[in-house]
C-alpha cells in the first residue's frame, strides 16, 4: 500500500516533465523528421527519400554556412570564457557581501530587456551615424564617419554580449565552492599565481567552465536575431538559412532537414568538447 | 408555461440570430491596411469585431500553410502569389461573387485580378490596394540614379541598399534589357535570365551597404543619409519626402514594378460573412480614402482617390507622369516552382564575396 502510494507520487511528479518531453520535444521532432525525408516532385506530390540531406552535401553554400556558423559559435564561446572568467573570479573570490551582490546584479541588468532591444542598442552604437562613430570624429581620431556595423566582428560582439551572463553564473557558483584555504595553501607551499590558477582554481572550476561553454555554444549556434541584424550583407548564419527555407522559399522539406543537421552538429560538438575536457555530462550538470 | 416556453424560444432564436450576425473577423494583412479608425467604424456599423495580424506575403502563405488555411478569416497576399500557393498547398477558398458588391471596384482591376488569381476555373482574389516598387533616391546626393542598374554605379558605392528578394531580381532583369515576365513559362529561359542577373548582383555586391529586410530599416538608413539610393516601395519614398524634400520615389526608366494586394478567403476561415462585410465596407470610396491616407497607397475602389490628402496626391504625381504609369510592369502570377530557382540564385548572391 505504502509502496503503491509512493509509486503513484513518483509518476505524478514525473508526469509534467514527461508531457513536456513527449508533447513539446519528441512529437514535433518526429513530425519534422517525416517532413525532412519527403521530396517534392511536383505540386502536392511528395516521395520519401533523403534528397534533402543530399542537397545539403552537394550544395557548397549550405555546408559552408554550416561550418562558418559552427566555427564562429566556437570562437564566440572561447571569447566569452576569456572575458567571463576574470569577471566571475573577481565576483566569487575578491569581493564580499554587498559589493558581490551589486556586481552580480550589474551582470544581470542588461538581461532585463529583450534581446531585440539589446541588439538594436548595439546597432545605435555601431552604425555609421552612431554613437561610437560620432565620438571618434569629435575626438579628432578619425576624419570621416566609420562604419562598424554589418561585419563579422559586430556579430561577435553581439554574440558575446548576449551570452556572457550564462558563462558568468555557473563560473561564480563553482568558484564560490572552492575553499579559499586551498588557494592559500598553494601560496604557502611556494606556488606562483599561474601555478595556483593552473593547478587549483581551473581544475576545480572545470565543471562550471564546461557547462557555461555548452550553454553559450548552444545559444550562439541557435541565435537568429544577432547575426541577421548586426551582420548585414555577409551575415550567413545557419538559423537564418532555416528561416529562409521555411518562410520565404516555402521549402519546409529542406528546412526540416537543416534543422536535424543543426541538432546533430550541436550534439557532436558538445560530445567532442566533453571528451576533450574529460568531463561527463552528468558531472557537469550536477555540480554547476 | 406555454408562454414562457415560447418566450424562451424567442430569446434563443434572437441570441442565435445575433450570433450568426456578429462574428470575430481575424484579418491577416499588411501594416496600414486596417487603421484603427476604420476598424472602429466597421465594428460600430456591423457589430463584428476585428482582430488584425500584420504580416508580409511570404509569412502570410507560411502561416496559412502551417494550419492548412485555418486561423484567419481574411488574408491579403499580392495577386501574383495566389494561384501558385493554391496549386501547391490548397490554402484558400473561392470567392463567392454574389456576396461582393462589384460596383465598388474599378472594373479593369477587378477583371485583371480575377484573371490572375484563377485556379482550376475558380476565382480566388479580389483587388484591394495597389502600388509599386522602384527607387527611393536622395536627389541631392545621388541625382544620377534613375534606373535599378544605376545602384551599381561607382558614384554611390557603399551607399546603396536593396532587398535580397524576388523584386530585386525582376527589377534588375528589366533594367538589363531582359524580360523576365515573358520567360515565366519557360524554365530554361528564366534560368538564363537569373544567371545574368546573378552575375550582375554579385558584381554589384561591394556597392551595397546592407540588404534591408523591413520597411522601417530602409527608412532609417535613408533618413540618416547612410544610404542615398535604394530599391524600395513607393510609399516609403513618399513618407520620407514629407520629412526631407530631397528624398523621393523615382519610377525607374525600366519601369516600376506594380503589385496589387488582394482579399482572399483562407480555406478554413470561420467568418466568411464578416469577411465579405469587411470587403464591401472598406471598398466604399470614403473608407478607401482613409486607408490610402494610412497606408500611403491607392486602392481599387471607384472614387477612392477623391478623399485622399492633397500632399499624397502631389507626391504621387511628382513620381509618376503618364509615361511612367504606362511603363509600370505588373507582376503576372508566379508559376509554381519558379521561386525555388530564384531562391537558389539569391542564396548564391548572398554567399558571394
Image (tube, rainbow, N blue to C red):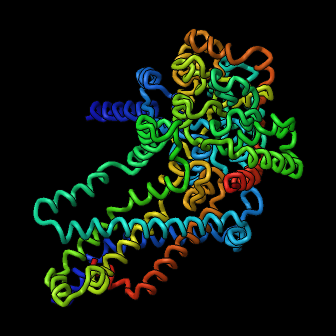
Does A162 sit above or below residue B292? below
Quadrant of the image occupied by residue B7? top left
Q: Position of residue B320 (x, y in %)?
A: 72, 17
Q: Position of residue B311 (x, y in %)?
A: 57, 11
Q: Position of residue A189 (x, y in %)?
A: 18, 90
**Count of marks placed on residues:** 0
Q: In the rendered image, is residue A199 in sight?
A: yes
Question: Left or right: B175 with respect to A91?
Answer: right
Q: Nearer the viewer, residue B269 or B85?
A: B85
Q: Nearer the viewer, residue B206 or A70?
A: B206
Residue at the left extreme of this rendering:
A97
Name which residue lies at 55% across and 22% down. B239
Question: Left or right: A262 with respect to B113?
Answer: left
- Quadrant in which the C terminus of chain B is drawn: bottom right
- Quadrant in which the N terminus of chain B is drawn: top left
Does A171 sit above or below residue B205? below
Q: Nearer the viewer, residue B124 or B240?
A: B240
Q: Position of residue B43 (x, y in %)?
A: 42, 25
Q: Nearer the viewer, residue A13 or A167?
A: A167
Name which residue lies at 63% across and 48% down. B91
Question: Left or right: B331 with respect to A176?
Answer: right
Name which residue lies at 37% across and 33% down. B15
Q: In the rendered image, is residue B272 in sight?
A: no
Amino acid at each position: 500500500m505504502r509502496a503503491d502510494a509512493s509509486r503513484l507520487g513518483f509518476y505524478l511528479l514525473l508526469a509534467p516533465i514527461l508531457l513536456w518531453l513527449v508533447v513539446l520535444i519528441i512529437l514535433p521532432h518526429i513530425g519534422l523528421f517525416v517532413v525532412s525525408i519527403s521530396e517534392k516532385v511536383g505540386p502536392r506530390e511528395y516521395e520519401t527519400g533523403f534528397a534533402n540531406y543530399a542537397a545539403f552535401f552537394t550544395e557548397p553554400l549550405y555546408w559552408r554556412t554550416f561550418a562558418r556558423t559552427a566555427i564562429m559559435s566556437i570562437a564566440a564561446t572561447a571569447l566569452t570564457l576569456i572575458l567571463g572568467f576574470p569577471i566571475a573570479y573577481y565576483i566569487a573570490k575578491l569581493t564580499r557581501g554587498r559589493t558581490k551582490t551589486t556586481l552580480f546584479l550589474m551582470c544581470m541588468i542588461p538581461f532585463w530587456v529583450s534581446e531585440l532591444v539589446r541588439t538594436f542598442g548595439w546597432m545605435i552604437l555601431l552604425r555609421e551615424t552612431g554613437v561610437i562613430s560620432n565620438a571618434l570624429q569629435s575626438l579628432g581620431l578619425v576624419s570621416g564617419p566609420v562604419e562598424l556595423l554589418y561585419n563579422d566582428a559586430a556579430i561577435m560582439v553581439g554574440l558575446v554580449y548576449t551570452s556572457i551572463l550564462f558563462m558568468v553564473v555557473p563560473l561564480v557558483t563553482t568558484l564560490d565552492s572552492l575553499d579559499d584555504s586551498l588557494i592559500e595553501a598553494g601560496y604557502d607551499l611556494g606556488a606562483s599565481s599561474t601555478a595556483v590558477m593552473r593547478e587549483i582554481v581551473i581544475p576545480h572550476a572545470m565543471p562550471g567552465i564546461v557547462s557555461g561553454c555548452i550553454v553559450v555554444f548552444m545559444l550562439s549556434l541557435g541565435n537568429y536575431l544577432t547575426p541577421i541584424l548586426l551582420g548585414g550583407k555577409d551575415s550567413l548564419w545557419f538559423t537564418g538559412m532555416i528561416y529562409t527555407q521555411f518562410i520565404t522559399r516555402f521549402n519546409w522539406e529542406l528546412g526540416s532537414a537543416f534543422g536535424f543537421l543543426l541538432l546533430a552538429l550541436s550534439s557532436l560538438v558538445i560530445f567532442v568538447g566533453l571528451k576533450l575536457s574529460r568531463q561527463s555530462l552528468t558531472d557537469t550538470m550536477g555540480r554547476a | 408555461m406555454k408562454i414562457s416556453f415560447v418566450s424562451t424560444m424567442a430569446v434563443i432564436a434572437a441570441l442565435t440570430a445575433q450570433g450568426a450576425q456578429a462574428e470575430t473577423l481575424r484579418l491577416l494583412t499588411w501594416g496600414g491596411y486596417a487603421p484603427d479608425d476604420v476598424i472602429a467604424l466597421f465594428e460600430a456599423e456591423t457589430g463584428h469585431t476585428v482582430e488584425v495580424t500584420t504580416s508580409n506575403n511570404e509569412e502570410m502563405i507560411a502561416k496559412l500553410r502551417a494550419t492548412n488555411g485555418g486561423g484567419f478569416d481574411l488574408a491579403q497576399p499580392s495577386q501574383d502569389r495566389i494561384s501558385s500557393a493554391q496549386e501547391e498547398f490548397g490554402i484558400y477558398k473561392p470567392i463567392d461573387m454574389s456576396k461582393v458588391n462589384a460596383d465598388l471596384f474599378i472594373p479593369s482591376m477587378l477583371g485583371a485580378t480575377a484573371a490572375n488569381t484563377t485556379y482550376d476555373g475558380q476565382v480566388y482574389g479580389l483587388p484591394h490596394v495597389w502600388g509599386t516598387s522602384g527607387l527611393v533616391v536622395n536627389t541631392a546626393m545621388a541625382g544620377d540614379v534613375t534606373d535599378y542598374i544605376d545602384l551599381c554605379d561607382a558614384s554611390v558605392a557603399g551607399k546603396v541598399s536593396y532587398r535580397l528578394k524576388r523584386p530585386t531580381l525582376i527589377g534588375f532583369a528589366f533594367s538589363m534589357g531582359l524580360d523576365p515576365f515573358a520567360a515565366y513559362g519557360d524554365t530554361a529561359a528564366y534560368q538564363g535570365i537569373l544567371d545574368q542577373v546573378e552575375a550582375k548582383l554579385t558584381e554589384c555586391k561591394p556597392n551595397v551597404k546592407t540588404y534591408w529586410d523591413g520597411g522601417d530599416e530602409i527608412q532609417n538608413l535613408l533618413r540618416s543619409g547612410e544610404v542615398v539610393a535604394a530599391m524600395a516601395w513607393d510609399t516609403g519614398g513618399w513618407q520620407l519626402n514629407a520629412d526631407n524634400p530631397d528624398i523621393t520615389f523615382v519610377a525607374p526608366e525600366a519601369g516600376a514594378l506594380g503589385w496589387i494586394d488582394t482579399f482572399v478567403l483562407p480555406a478554413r476561415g470561420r467568418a466568411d460573412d464578416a469577411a465579405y462585410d469587411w470587403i464591401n465596407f472598406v471598398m466604399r470610396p470614403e473608407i478607401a480614402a482613409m486607408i490610402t491616407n494610412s497606408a500611403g497607397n491607392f486602392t481599387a475602389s471607384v472614387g477612392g482617390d477623391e478623399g485622399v490628402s492633397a500632399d499624397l496626391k502631389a507626391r504621387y504625381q511628382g513620381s509618376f507622369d503618364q509615361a511612367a504609369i504606362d511603363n509600370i510592369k505588373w507582376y503576372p502570377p508566379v508559376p509554381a516552382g519558379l521561386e525555388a530557382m530564384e531562391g537558389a540564385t539569391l542564396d548564391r548572391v548572398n554567399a558571394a564575396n
